[in-house]
Image (cartoon, helix red, strand yellow):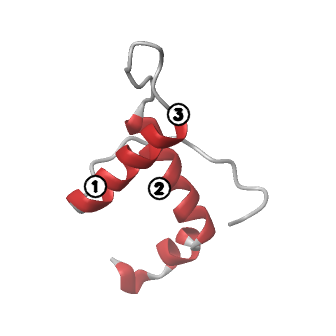
Amino acid sequence: MTENSPLVRVHVNIEISAAALQAVVANSKRKTGADESGHYRVDTADALADMISKFLQQKGFEDFSRDPKNY
């Protein structure tokens, strides 16, 4: 990723497998743990967004987006 390029937050609709979503929810809950009443206080949508952002940064989405063949 370009070092000088600022990051912006965008809201998009994406398609992922149900299994991937279940894994994110389960692992987010496992990482956070339940409170005293047994409820999980974790925003799994934010966890998913963070995970996808991390993946895109690490896997070179910027270069991928520059290639006209990917459109």
Q: Real-space Cα distance between discs 2 and 1?
A: 10 Å
In the picture, measured across the screen, residue 54 lies left or right of residue 10, that is: right
Q: Between residue 53 and residue 36, name the one nearer to us.
A: 36
Residue 26 in view in this figure: yes
Total number of numbered discs in the rendering: 3
Which residue is depicted at the point 37% across and 80% down? Answer: 70
Say if mark 2 contacts mark 1, CB within 8 Å: yes
Q: Between residue 27 and residue 55, name the one nearer to us.
A: 27
Label 3 packing within 10 angstroms: few (<14), some (14-19), many (20+): few
Residue 16 in view in this figure: no
Location of residue 35 in the rendering, given as x and y in whole percent from the top left corner: 47, 19
Location of residue 14 in the rendering, given as x and y in whole percent from the top left corner: 28, 55
Which residue is the site of mark 3?
32
Q: Which is nearer the N-term, disc 2 or disc 1?
A: 1
Check disc 2 and give the amino acid type. Answer: Ile
Q: Which mark is in front, 2 or 1? A: 2
Q: Which mark is in front, 3 or 1? A: 3
Q: What quarter of the picture does the C terminus occupy?
A: bottom left
Which residue is the site of mark 2?
52
Check disc 1 and give the amino acid type. Answer: Ile
Q: What quarter of the picture does the N terminus occupy?
A: bottom right
Say if mark 3 contacts mark 1, CB within 8 Å: no
Q: Is residue 70 above or below residue 26?
A: below
Mark number for residue 56?
none
Check disc 3 and give the amino acid type. Answer: Thr
Which residue is the site of mark 1?
14
Which residue is depicted at the point 57% across and 73% down? Answer: 59
Location of residue 40 in the rendering, given as x and y in whole percent from the top left corner: 41, 25
Q: Which is nearer the N-term, disc 3 or disc 1?
A: 1
In the picture, measured across the screen, residue 31 lies left or right of residue 17, that is: right
Which residue is depicted at the point 38% across and 20% down? Answer: 38
Q: Is residue 41 above or below residue 11?
A: above
